[in-house]
């Protein structure tokens, strides 16, 4: 996982603590910011190409004023590099591909993979457990291992493992996979299941969890996700 959404509540863990082992690029943005819409995907692409050697933390300044104040943000987009718990570099305003690439490369994005990277790349259970011994609370390793356990029908073990770390989009997705068993239906069956659950979500906790899990598995890029999230909000509130 190279791109994570960070809040005021998760900033300490996802940025400062994580930066002790992996450099973190913090992208301070807002939905109304035009330049942010151009810079954001560029940052995601460049950081994604590091294959985990650098992490991108996206912070919506409208929803997370404490983080914005900590960086003394006066205009956005504002981007900072954090390593070892300290800000080591940064820039304000939209930048071109070459500038962004150089910014990320200085953090080690073009360097040799770490031992954790190599163990994650191997991807087998023994390698992932070895990586977990090196970094017991590494959410990327935990997500990888939990997904492997789900595939091996060890769902309860996967959920216990996921409970060790704060929720991130990747952790939520794998947890949903564990609870559901990872069985994907046809598009028509997905629609029917969502409609069925929607009638029960207000008063049935299990139905609400199943509904949310199904949306997690569909993912943010599926057009049905936004539609059915709105339907859920309407039913609950």
Image (spheres, helix red, strand yellow):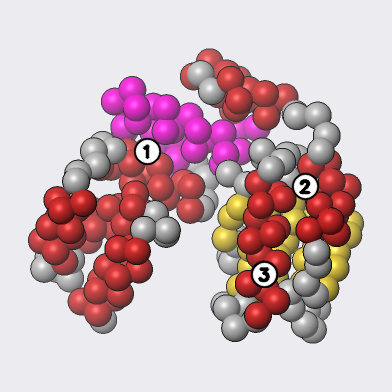
Q: In front here: 105 or 138?
A: 105
CA distance separating discs 1 and 2: 28 Å
The residue under label 3 is 38
Dot 1 falls on a residue whose secondary structure is helix
Left or right placement of residue 101 versus residue 178 in this view: right
Residue 122's spot in the image, x, y percent? 58, 20
Residue nearer the viewer, 140 or 136? 140
Secondary structure state at the residue bearing disc 2: loop
Q: Is residue 173 left or right of residue 126?
A: left
**In the image, residue 144 lies in the stretch drawn in magenta:** yes
Q: Which mark is residue 159?
A: 1
Packing grade of label 3 (10 A; few <14, some 14-19, many >=20) is: some
Q: Residue at x 27, y 68 (%)?
A: 228
Q: Is residue 221 magenta?
A: no
Q: Earlier in the sequence, mark 1 or mark 2?
A: 2
Residue 60 versus residue 149 in the image, above or below: below
Instruction: Provide residue 89's location: percent of width, then percent of height.
Output: 88, 59
């Amino acid at each position: 996982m190279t791109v994570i959404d960070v809040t005021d509540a998760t900033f300490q863990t996802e940025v400062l603590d994580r930066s002790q082992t992996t450099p973190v690029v913090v992208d301070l943005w807002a939905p109304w910011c035009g330049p942010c819409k151009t810079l954001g995907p560029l940052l995601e692409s460049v950081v994604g190409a590091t294959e985990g050697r650098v992490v991108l933390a996206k912070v919506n300044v409208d929803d997370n004023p404490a983080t914005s104040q900590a960086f003394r943000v006066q205009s956005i987009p504002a981007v900072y590099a954090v390593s070892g718990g300290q800000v080591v570099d940064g820039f304000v305003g939209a930048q071109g591909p070459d500038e962004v690439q150089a910014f990320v490369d200085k953090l080690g994005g073009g360097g040799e993979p770490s031992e954790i990277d190599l163990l994650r790349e191997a991807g087998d259970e023994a390698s992932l457990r070895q990586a977990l011994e090196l970094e017991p609370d590494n959410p990327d390793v935990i997500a990888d291992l939990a997904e492997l356990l789900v595939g091996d029908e060890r769902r309860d073990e996967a959920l216990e493992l996921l409970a060790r770390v704060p929720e991130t989009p990747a952790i939520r997705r794998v947890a949903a996979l564990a609870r559901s068993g990872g069985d994907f239906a046809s598009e028509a069956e997905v629609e029917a299941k969502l409609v069925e659950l929607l009638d029960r979500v207000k008063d049935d906790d299990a139905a609400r969890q199943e509904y949310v899990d199904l949306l997690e598995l569909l993912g943010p890029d599926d057009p049905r996700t936004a539609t059915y999230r709105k339907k859920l909000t309407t039913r609950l509130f």
